[in-house]
């Protein structure tokens, strides 16, 4: 079963189209990343998904329930952290968790304390939230999203306000909760290196539309590039430009970068050698998520 299934979301604010015919599927148990530049439609999508903004058209099912027709069942086991978490500053962290999650009983309190301990804030649970730093409030918000027993957790920029140690704690926390509790995590973040380390699947939005979606490994592997060191690079570049399914870039003094776009490296090497060129080195380029994202969104939207 899909934990999230969005079909044909559409949303306009005045004349501006924020989201256009957007569809997404997230399988149960995944850590799913929603990526895009500022203004791409990420926050609007998340708010429509949670019922905080009403879509002009389209539908969403959460954990098998239609949000419009079965609202209470759809959100019953969904936790979220959207924008800055709001707490009662005059109450303790512990009391905030109890009230805002409507959690009761010894099992709830043990779970709340265990989650806080994993994020390094258990020793401040009995302090008033008004004394917390922004990073501590963010961590408390992440804990709240997991309570009392969330099966789908939606996190919009979960590492806002955190220092590098806090970012690592949150990353490890997300991985542990996903692996141990069969929790589906749906997150949006601008920290691509963090997304690459925690997400199993992702989608990239541009101008309110999905321009890529799939498993992270498959998306990165599809960016199949090699660099060759070769004699007569200028003439070799002209030869390679004549072949189908290649994008070629000369790297002086003697190398060429080639995006294969469906051709296997062995086939490329065969063709080069048969054309009479001497290849001294061929190495495959391993793309990062940052490389993939920038290549995918490199066209300036204002042109």
Image (cartoon, grey):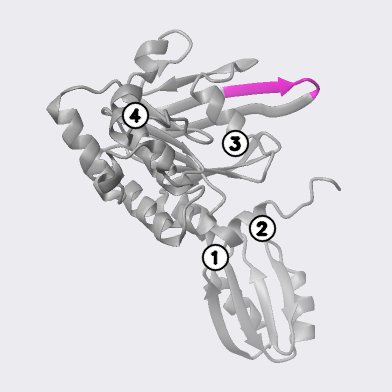
**What is the number of callouts on the image?**
4
Label 2–label 1 contact, CB within 8 A: yes
Mark number, residue 42: 3
Can you say whether 78 is above or below 127 in the image?
Answer: above
Labels 4 and 1 touching (C-beta < 8 A): no
Q: Position of residue 297 (x, y in %)?
A: 69, 51
Residue beneath disc 2: 295
Q: Residue furthest right?
A: 303
- Is 11 one of the magenta-colored residues? yes
- Magenta span of residues: 8-15
Front position in the image: 257 or 202: 202
Judging by the rendered image, the residue that carries numbered circle 1 is 287
Give the distance between the C-alpha atoms of the residues marked 4 and 1, in whole angstroms: 43 Å
Q: Classify mark 3: helix, strand or loop.
A: helix
Q: Which of these two is toward me, 172 or 123?
A: 123
- Residue contact between numbered discs 2 and 3, judged by CB atoms under 8 Å: no
Secondary element under disc 4, as helix, strand or loop, is helix
**Which is more foreground, mark 4 or mark 1?**
4
Instruction: Give x and y (percent) for residue 135.
Output: 45, 48
Residue at point 21%, 42% (across, down): 114
The residue at the point 72 percent across, 22 percent down is 12
Quadrant of the image containing the N terminus:
top left
Instruction: Point out the tag, 4 or 2, that comes first from the N-terminus.
Output: 4
Residue at mark 4:
96
Q: Badge 4 local density, few (<14 within 10 Å), some, or many (20+)?
A: many
254 relative to 194 in the view: left or right = right
Q: Main secondary structure of the magenta part?
A: strand
Q: CA distance from mark 4 to mark 3?
A: 28 Å
Q: Residue at x 40, y 52 (%)?
A: 198
Tag nearer the camera, 1 or 3: 3
Q: Earlier in the sequence, mark 2 or mark 1?
A: 1
Question: Which of pointers 4 and 2 indicates the residue nearer the eye?
Answer: 4
């Amino acid at each position: 079963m899909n934990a999230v299934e969005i079909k044909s979301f559409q949303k306009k604010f005045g004349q501006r189209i924020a989201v256009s015919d957007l569809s997404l599927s997230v399988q149960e148990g995944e850590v799913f990343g929603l990526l895009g530049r500022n203004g791409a439609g990420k926050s609007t999508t998340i708010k429509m998904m949670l019922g905080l903004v009403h879509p002009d058209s389209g539908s969403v099912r959460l954990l098998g329930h239609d949000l419009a027709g079965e609202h209470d069942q759809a959100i019953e086991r969904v936790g979220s952290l959207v924008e800055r978490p709001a707490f009662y500053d005059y109450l303790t962290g512990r009391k905030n968790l109890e009230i805002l999650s409507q959690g009761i009983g010894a099992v709830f309190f043990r779970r709340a304390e265990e989650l806080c301990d994993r994020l390094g804030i258990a020793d401040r649970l009995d302090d008033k939230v008004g004394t917390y730093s922004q990073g501590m409030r963010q961590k408390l918000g992440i804990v709240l999203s997991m309570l009392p027993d969330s099966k789908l957790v939606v996190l919009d920029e979960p590492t806002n306000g955190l220092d590098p140690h806090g970012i690592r704690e949150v990353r490890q926390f997300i991985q542990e909760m996903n692996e141990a509790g069969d929790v589906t995590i749906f997150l949006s973040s601008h920290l691509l290196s963090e997304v690459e380390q925690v997400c199993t699947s992702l989608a990239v939005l541009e101008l309110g539309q999905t321009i890529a979606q799939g498993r992270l490994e498959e998306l990165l592997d599809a960016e199949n590039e090699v660099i060759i060191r070769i004699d007569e690079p200028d003439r070799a570049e002209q030869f390679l430009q004549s072949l189908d399914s290649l994008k070629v870039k000369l790297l002086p003094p003697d190398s060429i970068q080639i995006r294969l776009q469906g051709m296997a490296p062995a086939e490329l090497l065969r063709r080069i050698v048969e054309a009479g060129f001497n290849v001294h080195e061929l190495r495959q380029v391993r793309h990062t998520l940052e490389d993939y994202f920038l290549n995918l969104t490199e066209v300036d939207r204002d042109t």
